[in-house]
């Protein structure tokens, strides 16, 4: 492991810049009494500690270069929560600005809890114990006073080395890790170390099952002891954890149990000491960057608020960036790259600083079905938010200019429905739609999600949920929990879908998770435990193919039925890449229920309860259809790609294209089956099928009755069938009924569709035409 030391070079660059540097360091034992709840694992349910394996410490470094005075504290805690930070700042020595106090946690999962008031967090941290909070804060303040009191003339430098054995990616074998070990050395005037800081990214979760109820600093405890033993008397060792979100400890010593914990800590100390030995210290200038920005909106804002704390510390040409939570390693690596491009010689990322907002996951990993993504609440653009915010705090180079807001969509109103033309990449299209329909989408989220949660319609009846008193509003817990569950639906979802959902939320001003939950509601509605709230939609769809369709070769008729009253919208999407397409649905749905692309490919979706319940762990079929409209050209291609989705349940998809010409119905039941016809009438469901229910059978028998004897079916014939409301039938058995939200005739060969929405009196409305022909004026 080759070390790099930067102090000597930086010393020459800093001559005459800084006043006399002073530094002091101290450590205070913060181990609480037995019985105080442990923090870090949900399955411990806040149980108290039963033993102490090794002590817990608050370790403080004080620095003052004459212009900037600061405290840097590293504590053997799982997190720095807001309550602790606020109390520590109240107790901190008043001469140091509160913006210059940096608090970090090592993230040991065997440290104390009991310091968080939020009910949402207490299942992990245990019951709130104000005496634990007060005692811990007082000891932090004692460490600060002691470090300030120990101040003496000092010099400082830094270095790095590369490692490949101390950490591993805990989600992907061979996945990215941070190879860098960062080291900062602070010496007194005689060259003796006052403090040595190691920066390294890995979860301190090496304590075995048998000691889960023991207080322990985990591997940092052995690191402190070994490093301080190797250094001069009085040296204080500090450990700053890095971008650790998806990083775990390796096993460089090939040990087990506590021997493994000891091996990691001691070997890390050896590496840090080797780098420290090569560092030449100097009086480098200090600079603190501080901001309290608002995070992007999230579903946990009601519990934690949006404002957080960001800090940077510049030591000469070294940049330290302090994250208020657990960033995944790719975010730390990208931020380092950007810092070096801005002119810094080195950069260290420090997680778990000043606040804890759970995990920060890069956009490319948001669909991954991992623990970190489930507990990442700020959407796929949180990494860009950090790059921009930290960029503004850097003093070197020029910050990137924020991207311009996407141009507004082209919006028209035709026959009572919005016709919206979207242009650009997926995020821009989503943003344009969100901005154009902001009020309607926000209302849909309130009705479909917030109101349902508040009414306890989305609250499970089993488990701990049933213990909640009837008067307790569980919305702030239920809705984030629903969002966590919805993450599994993103597995296998394309980045186009992800970006469009993100843009939709941003355009409305809703969290990413709110926009995601709106997309997931059709799947949630199909679950048995909420069937009373959401009745499954019963649609009608059919195709006339070949001679039956006359000169058009293929005609498709489609009625979408939906249990809720929703505002209709026609969306014409002109993506940067792929096919242009039109989808007819509602302002909030990114997925496709009914649509056609500029190749003439038609896709329509029908929910069929008898074929099974859609899994909440599988990508919603609406997302699949949205992706196919943009990327597929023929019915054969679409049918083949749909047939590969063997985990889907409970749907029919009608696909048609004019090239063959042909129409297909892909049925997703216990197995995937395909019905295809090159000529004649193809119904969305065959009335003779054993599994078909009475209502669907009546509808499809009526469609066959109206069209079977027609030698040639034309557009007007299809429109007549879609508007059929036979008064002699039960309301639910009518093709056009009170739940019908749109009627469409697709003419794939001509790249035209004709759309109608119910009139104000509930009768079928007037059809309007939409064209995807290339020669049509934009």
Image: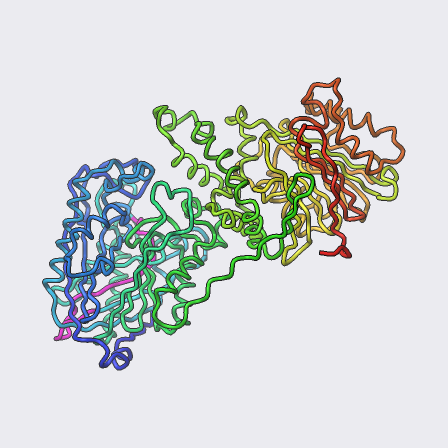
Q: Which residues are magenta?
A: 186-206
Q: Residue 383: in sight, yes or no?
A: yes
Classify the position of the N terminus by image quarter: bottom left
Given the current orientation, which residue lies at the most extreme right position? 711
490, 438: nearer the viewer:
438
Q: Is residue 626 above or below residue 290?
A: above
Between 229 and 56, the residue placed more toward the observer is 56
Image coordinates for residue 23, horizontal then vertical, percent? 16, 67
**72 on left or right of 499:** left
Please determine whether, in this image, residue 684 is positioned above or below residue 255: above
Q: Using residue 239 as the reference point, say whether residue 609 is left or right of it.
A: right
Q: On the picture, is 416 further left or further right than 38? A: right
Instruction: Provide residue 11's location: percent of width, then percent of height.
Output: 25, 79
User: According to the image, what is the colour scheme of the structure?
Assistant: rainbow
Q: Is residue 670 visible?
A: no
Q: Residue 329: percent from the left, percent from the top?
A: 40, 58
The verdict on residue 203 being magenta is yes
The picture quadrant where one finds residue 758 is top right
Looking at this view, name the residue that lies furthest to the left: 149
Across and down, in percent, residue 575 comes to 63, 55
> Measuring 43% from the left and 57% from the top, which residue is drawn there?
383
Residue nearer the viewer, 97 or 543: 97
The answer to if 494 sits in the magenta stretch is no
In the rendered view of the protein, which quadrant contains the C terminus? bottom right
Q: Quadrant of residue 672?
A: top right
Count of picture labels = 0
Q: Looking at the image, which residue is at 56% across and 50% down?
A: 430
């Amino acid at each position: 492991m080759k070390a790099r030391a930067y102090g000597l070079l930086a010393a020459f660059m800093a001559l005459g810049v800084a006043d006399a540097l002073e530094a002091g360091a101290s450590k205070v034992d913060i181990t609480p009494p037995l019985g105080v709840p442990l923090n870090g694992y949900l399955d411990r349910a806040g149980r108290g500690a039963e033993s102490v394996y090794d002590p817990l410490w608050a370790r403080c470094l004080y620095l003052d270069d004459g212009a900037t005075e600061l405290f840097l504290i590293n504590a053997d805690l799982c997190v720095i929560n807001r309550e602790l930070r606020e109390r520590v700042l109240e107790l901190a020595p008043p001469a140091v600005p509160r913006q210059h106090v940096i608090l970090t946690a090592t993230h040991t999962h065997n440290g104390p809890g009991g310091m968080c008031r939020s009910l949402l967090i207490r299942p992990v941290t245990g019951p709130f114990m104000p005496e634990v909070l007060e005692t811990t804060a007082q000891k932090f303040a004692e460490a600060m006073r002691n470090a300030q009191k120990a101040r003496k003339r000092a010099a400082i430098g830094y270095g790095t080395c590369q490692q490949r054995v101390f950490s591993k990616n805990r989600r992907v074998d061979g996945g990215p890790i941070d190879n860098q070990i960062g080291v900062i050395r602070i010496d007194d005037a005689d060259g003796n170390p006052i403090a040595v800081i190691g920066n390294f990214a890995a979860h301190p979760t090496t304590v075995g099952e048998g000691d889960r109820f023991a207080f322990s600093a985990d591997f940092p405890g052995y690191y402190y002891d070994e490093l301080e033993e190797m250094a001069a008397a009085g040296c204080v060792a500090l450990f700053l954890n890095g971008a650790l979100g998806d990083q775990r400890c390796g096993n460089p010593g090939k040990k087990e149990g506590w021997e493994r914990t000891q091996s990691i800590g001691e070997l890390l100390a050896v590496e840090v000491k080797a780098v420290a030995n090569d560092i030449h210290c100097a009086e480098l200038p200090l600079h603190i960057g501080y901001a309290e920005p608002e995070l992007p909106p999230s579903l946990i804002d009601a519990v934690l608020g949006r404002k957080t704390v960001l800090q940077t510390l510049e030591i000469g040409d070294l940049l330290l960036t302090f994250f208020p939570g657990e960033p995944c390693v790719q975010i730390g690596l990208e931020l380092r790259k950007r810092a070096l491009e801005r002119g810094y010689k080195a950069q260290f990322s420090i997680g778990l600083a000043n606040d804890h907002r759970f995990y920060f996951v890069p956009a490319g990993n948001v669909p991954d079905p991992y623990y970190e993504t489930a507990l990442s609440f700020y959407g796929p653009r949180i990494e860009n938010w950090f790059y921009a915010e930290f960029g503004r705090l850097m003093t070197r180079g020029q910050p990137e200019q924020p991207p311009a807001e996407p141009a507004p969509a082209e919006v028209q109103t035709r026959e009572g429905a919005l016709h919206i033309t979207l242009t650009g990449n997926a995020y821009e299209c989503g943003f344009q739609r969100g901005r154009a329909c902001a009020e309607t989408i926000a209302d849909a989220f309130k009705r479909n999600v917030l109101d349902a949660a508040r009414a306890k319609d989305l609250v499970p009846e089993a488990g701990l949920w049933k213990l909640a008193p009837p008067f307790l509003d569980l919305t702030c817990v239920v809705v984030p929990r629903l969002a966590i569950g919805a993450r599994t639906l993103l597995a296998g979802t394309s980045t186009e879908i992800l970006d469009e959902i993100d843009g939709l939320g941003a355009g409305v001003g809703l969290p990413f998770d709110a926009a995601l939950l709106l997309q997931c509601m059709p799947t949630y509605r199909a679950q048995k435990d909420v069937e009373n709230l959401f009745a499954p939609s019963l649609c009608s769809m059919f195709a006339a193919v070949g001679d039956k369709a006359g000169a058009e070769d293929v005609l498709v008729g489609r009625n979408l039925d939906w249990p809720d009253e929703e505002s209709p919208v026609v969306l014409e999407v002109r993506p940067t890449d792929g096919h242009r397409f039109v989808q007819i649905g509602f302002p909030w749905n990114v997925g496709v229920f009914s649509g056609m692309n500029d190749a003439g490919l038609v896709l329509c979706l029908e929910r069929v309860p008898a074929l099974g319940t859609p899994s909440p762990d599988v990508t919603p079929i609406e997302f699949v259809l949205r992706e196919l409209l943009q990327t597929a050209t023929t019915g054969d291609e679409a049918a083949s790609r749909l047939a590969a989705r063997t985990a889907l349940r409970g749907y029919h998809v009608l696909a048609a294209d004019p090239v063959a010409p042909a129409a297909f119905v892909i049925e997703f039941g216990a197995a995937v089956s395909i019905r295809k016809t090159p000529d004649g009438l193809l119904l969305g469901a065959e009335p003779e099928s054993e599994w078909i229910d009475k209502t669907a059978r009546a509808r499809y028998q009526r469609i066959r009755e109206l069209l079977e004897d027609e030698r040639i079916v034309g557009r007007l014939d299809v429109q007549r069938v879609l508007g059929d409301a036979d008064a002699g039938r039960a309301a639910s058995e009518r093709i056009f009924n009170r739940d019908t939200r749109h009627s469409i005739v697709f003419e794939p060969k001509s790249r035209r569709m004709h759309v109608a929405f119910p009139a104000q009196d509930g009768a079928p409305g007037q059809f309007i035409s939409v064209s995807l022909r290339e020669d049509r004026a934009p």
